[in-house]
Image (cartoon, coloured by chain):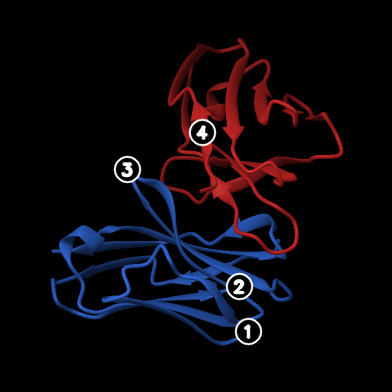
Amino acid sequence: DARVTQTPRHKVTEMGQEVTMRCQPILGHNTVFWYRQTMMQGLELLAYFRNRAPLDDSGMPKDRFSAEMPDATLATLKIQPSEPRDSAVYFCASAELNYGYTFGSGTRLTVV
Amino acid sequence: GENVEQHPSTLSVQEGDSAVIKCTYSDSASNYFPWYKQELGKRPQLIIDIRSNVGEKKDQRIAVTLNKTAKHFSLHITETQPEDSAVYFCAASRSGGFKTIFGAGTRLFVKA
């Protein structure tokens, strides 16, 4: 089965530190999404890309979050500086156009 | 803006009974409706989807129905088993590159 690969799986960091999460989408998928999941908020869309171009990042706090796709095999989500309220599971997903997302295993981020 | 409402938020059934989860959407141009299952600590996974040119789709014990006029769609699980216990997310999107809107999720408990 083709997979979306996310690294790291777990990250514990101190408040104020930079966090970088990485995602390798499925080869041939041209749409990549970043979601944040907390118990209270469900699946919250942060940003998404089509053919590596950012289409919508309105769900992201712009002052501290940034998302990029330097090439077709890598998407990154950075938080700088991190805060305790950023603690959540961050999922990357990829799809062909907008059908049938495949999610990665997620990065569980804890900011202390 | 676009919105997907999902009910109930929690559902508890006895093993062998049926479970029904309902969603309504606001964007009348939506034409693709996937359902995702997320087991505890795991990624959401696509379990079934339906497009607006059909009213019903079945896959073994699960079925989805769509009523475009009323803008609602439902997931039906028959002969529930303990392994069906998970959070289920409905979603709606348009073809042509628009983002998918997720419901808030339904936590299903199947009691043995």
The answer to whether residue A40 is left or right of residue A21 is left
Is the Cβ of the residue at disc 2 closer than 8 Å to that at disc 1? yes
Amino acid beneath label 3: Met
* Secondary structure state at the residue bearing disc 3: loop
The answer to whether marks 4 and 2 mark residues whose Cβ atoms lie closer than 8 Å is no
Q: Nearer the viewer, mark 1 or mark 4?
A: 4
**Residue under numbered circle 3:** A39
Q: Are marks 2 and 1 on the same chain?
A: yes
Colour of chain B as rendered:
red
The part of the image, by quadrant, that contains residue B35 is top right
Q: Is residue A101 visible?
A: yes
Instruction: Tell me what residue is drawn at x 20 percent, y 58 percent.
Output: A85
Q: Have a look at marks 2 and 3 and say if they share a chain.
A: yes
Q: Is residue A104 above or below residue B87?
A: below
Q: Look at the numbered disc 2 and give the secondary structure of its residue.
A: loop
Q: Amino acid at mark 1?
A: Ala
Chain shown blue: that is: A
Dot 1 or dot 3, earlier in sequence = 3
Q: Nearer the viewer, mark 4 or mark 2?
A: 4
